[in-house]
Amino acid sequence: MALKRKGTWLAAWVLVGWLAGAPAGAQGLRDAQIFAPAEPAHYGGGVRANEGFFFCYDGLYWSMSAPARSTFGVDTSTLATQRQVWWDSDPNHTSTQQSNMNTSFLENQFTPGQRIELGYINEHQGWLFSYFQLHWSGQGEGRPGVEAYFHDDNWGVANLPHLYWYNTAGDYVFAPVYFDNVGIELYTRAWGTEINYLVRTHPGEWGGMWEWFSGVRYLEFDEEYDVDATGTSSATCVLADTKFTNYATNKLFGPQVGLRWFKTNDRWELSLQGKFMAALNSQSVRLGGSMATLGGGRLLAMTTSIIDDSAHMSVFSPVVELRVEAKYQLTNKVTFKAGWNGMYIGELARPSRMVDYHLYDTHVMGILTNMNRDLCFLQGVAIGIEINR
């Protein structure tokens, strides 16, 4: 809850500080008269654009698109050679090992957030600082009777595959990887900040005005993928209990350009805005957990194992943001606004796709560093107020 309140408290303190800082902020702030009556005009292309300091606060309700589908275990539909396994309950029964659970249940998830903008403009030049945050969004699903395929190398100590056991005839055979219950959860959040230099043009022939942006921006996209695979007996669930978390952080930083067009008509204003950032994305992925902690099974070459791996990559990530807003002037300086936002972030590390289900000769599982180029589309509504813009 403290994380969710952070942006709201920040907005409150910025607004209080802005209003209370009049003595230190020169005559323009002391004479702001933000509650003076609105003065709509119908000549010369509409109301003259405000100048001086401005503050904006928006409440956000955005969705974040789900990652591409991934499989718990190796996707067996891609394997050229299938593996036959022998079941303990019926040693004469063999079947092809499957991976029968995936993340297709994940949906575009809506979550609340906030955006704060603070800036200053004098005649045709100014600056803009912006901060936004979307709170953690989570979803998950649990299923009974789940199989999972693991690639299997010979274990370094016993020189046997991890999943070998004896059948009742005393032969070495592959044991099936089966769990009584598997729960999968995914948590996602995004936040960012930016600073821009503004250039405002003269009103156009039909009254519209343009504002050009140039500056730098920082975005962070974090995601956590949790798996809890359990069983009631190690005799039938040979890798139970297996629990792990794969956590990915994408830190995007780079130059940004943008353009905003707005036009007034009486108390109403329509604005359209677009931004583009060419970002260097510093990706960090951390996988941790444990495997086969239930113990007591008949696997010949494997006992409880720690899952531990990390990776760091750098890629180029394009970011495109669009904003459409309608505004209504309540007083001379205060405006109510509502609109739609969309943001595309490319080349992201999303951890559900980056788990390596492989039992190596010295360790178990790892990170698929070549699967770090997913994407996310964020979109939704924004409702808020502006003071003197």
Image: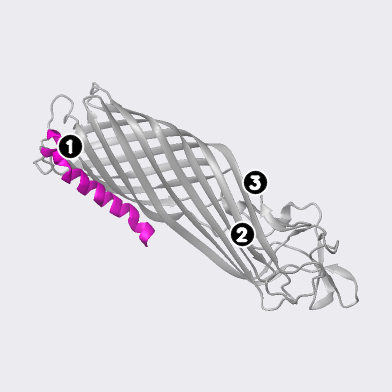
Q: Which residue is mark 3?
A: 369
Q: Position of residue 163 (x, y in %)?
A: 79, 66
Against 160, is 145 above or below?
Answer: below
Q: Residues within 10 Å of mark 2 (few under 14, many from 20)?
A: some
Q: Which residue is mark 1?
A: 25
Specify the quadrant that holds the N terminus: bottom left
Q: Residues within 10 Å of mark 1 (few under 14, many from 20)?
A: few
Q: Position of residue 384 (x, y in %)?
A: 26, 48
The answer to which of 150 and 161 lies nearer the viewer is 161
Q: Of helix, strand and loop, which one carries label 2? A: strand
Residue 233 numbered mark, or none? none
Of marks 1 and 3, which one's residue comes earlier in the chain?
1
What residue is at 10 percent from the left and 37 percent from the top?
31
Residue at the farthest front position: 24
The answer to which of 5 and 135 lies nearer the viewer is 5
Q: Position of residue 356 (x, y in %)?
A: 68, 54
Residue 4 seen in this snapshot: yes
Secondary structure that dominates the magenta span: helix
Residue 288 numbered mark, or none? 2
Tell me if 1 is positioned left or right of 9 in this view.
right
Residue at the farthest left position: 37
Against 12, is 161 above or below?
Answer: below
What residue is at 56 percent from the left and 50 percent from the top?
350
Disc 2 residue type?
Gly
Q: Is residue 10 magenta?
A: yes
